[in-house]
Image (cartoon, helix red, strand yellow):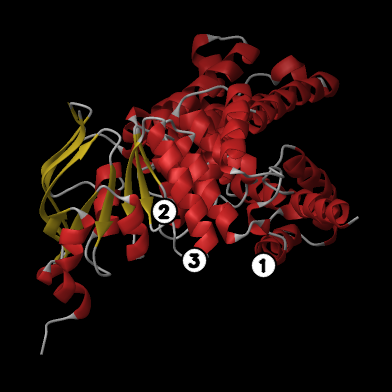
Amino acid sequence: MMFRSGQPGLSVAGFFGLGGYAAALSFLYWGVNPLVSIALGCLFSLLVAFILGLVILRIRGLYFSIATMSLSEIFRVIVMNWHRFTGGPSGKALPSAVFNGDSAKIFWLFLVLTLLTVIVSEIFERSRIHFALTSIRNNEIVAKSSGIDVFKYLVVVFALTSALQGMIGGAYAHSYAFISPEGSFNFNFVLLPVTMALFGGIHSTLGPIVGAVILGVVGEYLKLQLPYGHLLVYGVIIVIVILFLPKGIVGTAKERLKHKWATI
Amino acid sequence: MQILEIENLSKCFGGLTALNQVNARFEEREIVGIIGPNGAGKTTFINVVSGVYPPNSGRIIFDGRDITKLPAHTRCRLGIGRTFQVIHPLQDLNLLQNIMVGSLFGQGNGLREARVKAQEICEFLGLDQLERDTSQLDILEIKKMEMARALATHPKILFLDEIMAGLSADETKEVIETIRTIRDQGITICVVEHVMSVIEELTERVIALDGGRIIAQGQYKEVANNPRVISAYLGEEE
């Protein structure tokens, strides 16, 4: 959704990890119920993203990408060095996974959270927010000359998407019962979601879902063939998408269909 | 009733002074023309007044309120509308949606109301087949769309930046009539134009800019015959 506003946000891993740590640590230190702690992870990411957003959303496009990429690293380094609180480089293991590791229940948990994300994305697509983000992406000057408070929209979208990332991060931390700087803030958590979203098409809710399903399955298969080979493939995919399929699979398919209907 | 007052407005881009101590007044329901050679500062004037660029010095008083420090989107909501010299359709939205943007954010309407308002404006301007992509529109339609988007924000003053550029004689006539109708609905209009016949026919008052300064102001006849204006366009007499 951040991409829909024209600002490629690459801080996914950062807020994912932050949410994970917030959820895990609130569970460890305060004995908070795991599900509530996931909500806390979500809120924590929301707050941090909001505050940081007020600062870094003064810059746009490529520079914004670089700034958000560095956010993940900054969080990781802070967490890694705050030994006493976060357990430092070795992280912390939780006494038990959420639902005691029951795979079925964990599946449902992630399904519910995914549905939540889908709902938020659809709300964005069907409301005035869609108009705002698209206008901002197409031409910021026209947008603000037409009454759009560009900064406000960007901060809100950034905070909300980061909150969602934190929420999933919290669920992830609890399902593996483990948090660590390397594990929770891993670059994979930027590369994979972004590739899947770009591949599927960022302009719809369906796009990233399609992308995730295809690449998820392909990725698991590739991992069996080549260790880390899937990373190479993902990198290649990003380049191909940017060059040939900027709207992703779903987006390009929609366009082709529109053309077909128009020429009938 | 004065709607807009510009006081000693100056704007520099690095070493280049684009606007130099500009003073101007706009009365309600006036149609004012701004002329000047390329680089005179006409578009910069619109950009500074609408809030795209902050001025280096000076004040802008709109509807009795000092808006000098206000951001562009707030000025739009207060009633300053403008079109762009280089057409800027929002390419991922269709014709109707482009116009809805003005209503949604310049006026704060809901989706349904914005759609209705946009359709009304399209009818007024003679635009149809509203689901079309902006890439499928001809030049007159795109210009109308730009006007429509600005009108959808319910402006009190509308700046039209070279809206006649690229239009045929008939199309120009149509747009002139439309502008008069818009004015009759209570909106002050300021047209920046290079086509002198349009300025002569349409405007009640003309401001001539050159090098960021106002070099003449008044009725078209006086301004067009002003030697400084002539030399600004044509160069000094040998």
Q: Is residue A81 above or below residue A65?
A: above
Q: Chain of mark 2?
A: B
Q: Residue A114 versus residue A134: which sits nearer the camera?
A: A134
- Gap in Å between the C-alphas at discs 3 and 1? 34 Å
Instruction: Answer yes or no: are tags 3 and 2 on the same subunit.
Output: yes
Q: Residues within 10 Å of mark 3 (few under 14, many from 20)?
A: few
Query: In the picture shown, does residue A86 fall above or below A211?
Result: above
In this rendering, does residue A227 appear at all?
Answer: yes
Residue, disc 3: B166
Badge nearest the viewer, 3 or 2: 3
Residue A252, how many percent across, how many down? 77, 55
The three-letter code of the residue at mark 1 reads: Leu
Quarter containing the C terminus of chain B: bottom left
Q: CA distance from mark 2 to mark 1?
A: 30 Å
Per the image, the residue denoted by label 1 is A243
In the picture provided, is A128 more to the left or to the right than A110? left
Estimate the x, y position of residue B165 in percent, counting from the top left. Answer: 44, 63
Q: Chain of mark 1?
A: A
Q: In which quarter of the view is residue A23 placed?
A: top right
Q: Which residue is mark 2?
A: B84
Between B8 and A129, the residue placed more toward the observer is B8
* Three-letter amino acid code at the position of disc 3: Gly
